[in-house]
Amino acid sequence: MRQIAINASFWNQPNTGSGQYVRALIPTLARHDFESDYTLIAPSALDQVPFCVNAYQTPVALNRVSANLGKVWFEQIAFTRACLRERATLAHVPYFAPPFFSRTPVVVTIHDLIPMLLPAYRGSLLVRAYMQLVAASARRARAIIADSECSKRDIVRILRVPESRVRVAYLAAHERFVPVNDATVRAKFNLPENFLLYLGGYDQRKNVRVLIEAFAQLPEFYRAGVRLVLAGINLGQDSEFFPAPRRIAREANLPDDAIQCIGWVDEADKPALYSHAHAFLFPSLYEGFGLPPLEAMACGAPVLASNASSLPEVIGDAGILLAPREARAWADALHAVLTDNARRDMLRTRGLQQAKKFSWQRAAEETLAIYQSIL
């Protein structure tokens, strides 16, 4: 039997993108790959480990000194030692942090290169040094998995690796994302009958400003009770990097009550929230894949998204793709989905069909093919 070791640092963080990825992909792989044993290796005890996967804890004493130092030690030293102890045939690091030295062949998944692509996300000198380390380590990996063709192009260009070593395996929405008619979620968040939904972060890259500026150009709708619902938590104080939606609304002369900021949404509530939305809006400037629009389509929500980075790959012709910074174009598109029932129904139908093209079983099959190609 082949022994596949997985860096499971994000396993206990299911609300992060890397956590969702490892929790969805690895159990699916283990259930369909009868020639391998899968072992999760982490610096702390893991919760909700499925029966088809093993778990191995390798505590890191340096966490007591510095969480960041402990993180790097686990990624670069402790994980590789654990791979040797487990006699791993292959090591998979499901986020951008492969070890520089490894006697075990390494596959790394790079979801995006945002800290290397966008100046505002480059961080401190230490963060930049860390990015240089993991970039050099990725160049030594036997294979790199990208979430999209867009990410693959960025990886090849920025990391200067041969295109043949970078393979694409698309992500998928969780199976719970289906159309749901649950009035309790509407009541829980005090939602109006008609609302436009954004769900995600509020940092600069997410470009929420264009939604607010576009909605401000549609007074006939917000005066009639349509609301722009913003879901998610703004993790920073009002700044250029974390612009506050309420401040942007005031600058756009949009009344305070035209926007509802509903905060954090539990994963269990998301399907109903998507399903009730008149449309789902996602104006991000850059995404390695873009899972929220796919989740929304799987729930039958018409999707309006930016035509940037990987989003056209995910959405195809099933949604309305717009230039991310053109508020007037967004306002026109919002007007269309709020007034044209036939077009909205068409987008719902196309979105459901598009979402079916993505599955975790397909992602697992493509990942397994990558494993087999280097073993």
Image: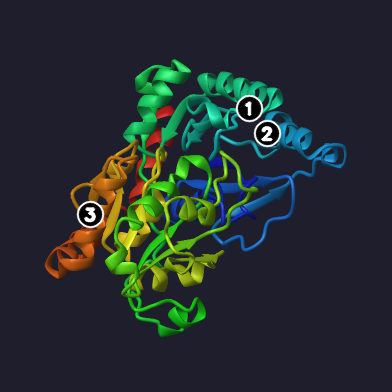
Q: Is residue 191 above or below residue 124?
A: below
Residue 375 in view of the camera:
no
The span from disc 2 to disc 1 (Cα, nearest Å) is 6 Å
The tag earlier along the polypeptide, 2 or 1, is 2
Q: Depth check: 229 or 22 in front? A: 229
Q: Depth check: 217 or 362 in front? A: 217
For the residues labelled 2 and 1, say whether their Cβ atoms are less than 8 Å apart.
yes
The span from disc 1 to disc 3 (Cα, nearest Å) is 46 Å
Q: Quadrant of the C terminus?
A: top left
- Disc 2 packing (10 Å; few <14; some 14–19; many ≥20): many
Q: Amino acid at mark 2?
A: Glu
Can you tell which quarter of the image residue 181 is in?
bottom left
Q: Depth check: 347 or 99 in front? A: 347
The tag earlier along the polypeptide, 3 or 2, is 2
Residue underneath mark 3: 333
| Label 2: element kind | helix
